[in-house]
Image (tube, rainbow, N blue to C red):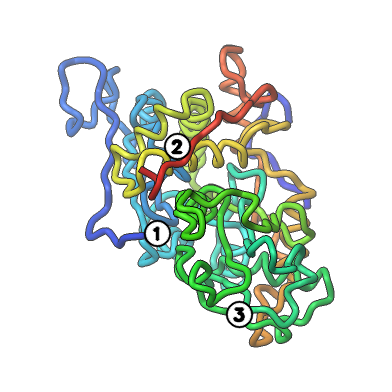
Amino acid sequence: MKHSTRRGLATGAFALSAAIILTACSGGGGETPDSGDDGGGGELKQVKLQLQWLPQAQFAGYFAAVDQGYFEEEGLEVEIIPSGGDIVPQDALANGDVDFAIAWVPKVLGSIESGANLTDIAQIFQRSGTLQVSWADSGIDSVADFEGKKIGSWGFGNEWEIFAAMAAENLDASTVEIITQDFNMNAFLQGDIDAAQAMTYNEYAQLLETENPDTGELYEPADFNVISYQDTVGAMLQDAIWADTEKLESDEEYADTAVSFLKAVIKGWIFARDNPEEAAEITLANGSAWGPSHELWMMNEINKLIWPATAGIGIIDEAAWNQTVEGALAAVNETGAHLITQEPPATAYSNEYIQEALDELSEDGELDLLGEDFEPIEVELQPAGN
């Protein structure tokens, strides 16, 4: 796919009753946050960001960008709107309810085929965090072993990596029993599911913070077989920042805002990388319902999905994008339904806005935009994530 440049670049689970409003505080002039003053006498640009789930470390970079004043530095006042499953991020964006949205790429590809005009302007997660977890003695060591088994899936568009990986193994989805799974591991622990869907940063941690009734101690990784979809052909790109395609092309102010927004977000994720404990505390302070050890585990695992960013944080890797599209085209669920039936338009993603943000931030030379030396921390989970 070829993507035009807009301007010269230097280098080519609980439902919430109300949105969480996070506002950058003014740094000068004695103004209150509600004044909309950017500290330099100008008005802050009001921006709405739609998350795809509840506040947690999955979104730590955005919360940190507010907490550390990075949005304000870019002249923005950002309202972060969570979803407990009651709001579909790409729908909120396509309907004009928000300015930007966080959503998995395959989910939005389906929406684009249905008529949504959206563009991935930053691929924050460079790797898939989806797992399928079975008991160590189950004999389920790979996707090829799914046949005849009860396979857990959350649905809601989270299932397409499962079906893409099965398609790559020439495994008909009708040969497995898909069990609708809650966003926890209860059904798996009760024996109702042979292999449960889990995220590295959430449900897998739920297992490891649960007491093994046979030992009286917490479960250990050796108790499970873990299939990582990142290691399969079915791996798909996940959390990305989406923008309105038509507005990017026709509204210069919106395009400029996108670049400013991305600059602040980049700094937020760098902060979360370099200060995982503090970033976890920030998400807890902003409404996460998880316990502190669970939240820190999540922050650490999220960093692994982002860093290192070999081309720069947020850059969309063409090979990973193409693999996601190919998987989306190949995936057929247990009812015979397809996610998409044709290639998405070239406007479905663009690196020009994230590249411009990276170029502007690289000018001072102080920020590590690649994270080549990133090392995760050690996190000890406590019972129930406390």
Q: Answer few, some or many: residues within 10 Å of disc 1's Cα (few below 14, many 20 plus, some between 14 and 19).
A: few
Above or below for 260 versus 338: above
Q: Camera-side residue: 200 or 361?
A: 200
Q: Position of residue 239 (x, y in %)?
A: 56, 50
Categorize mark 2 by other alpha carbons within 10 Å: few (<14), some (14-19), many (20+): many
Which residue in the structure is indicated by mark 2?
296
- Nearer the observer: mark 1 or 3; the answer is 3
Which percent across, then down, holds residue 21?
A: 26, 44
Category of crowding for the residue at label 3, using alpha-carbon neighbours closer than 10 angstroms: few (below 14), some (14–19), many (at least 20): some
> The C terminus is located in which quarter?
top left
Between discs 1 and 2, the one toward the N terminus: 1
SS assignment at label 3: strand
> Residue 86: horizontal and vertical position, in percent?
36, 67
CB atoms at circles 1 and 2 under 8 Å apart? no
Q: Quadrant of residue 121?
A: top right
Distance of label 1 from label 3 (alpha carbons): 35 Å
Spatial separation of the CA atoms under disc 3 and disc 2: 32 Å
Real-space Cα distance between discs 1 and 2? 34 Å
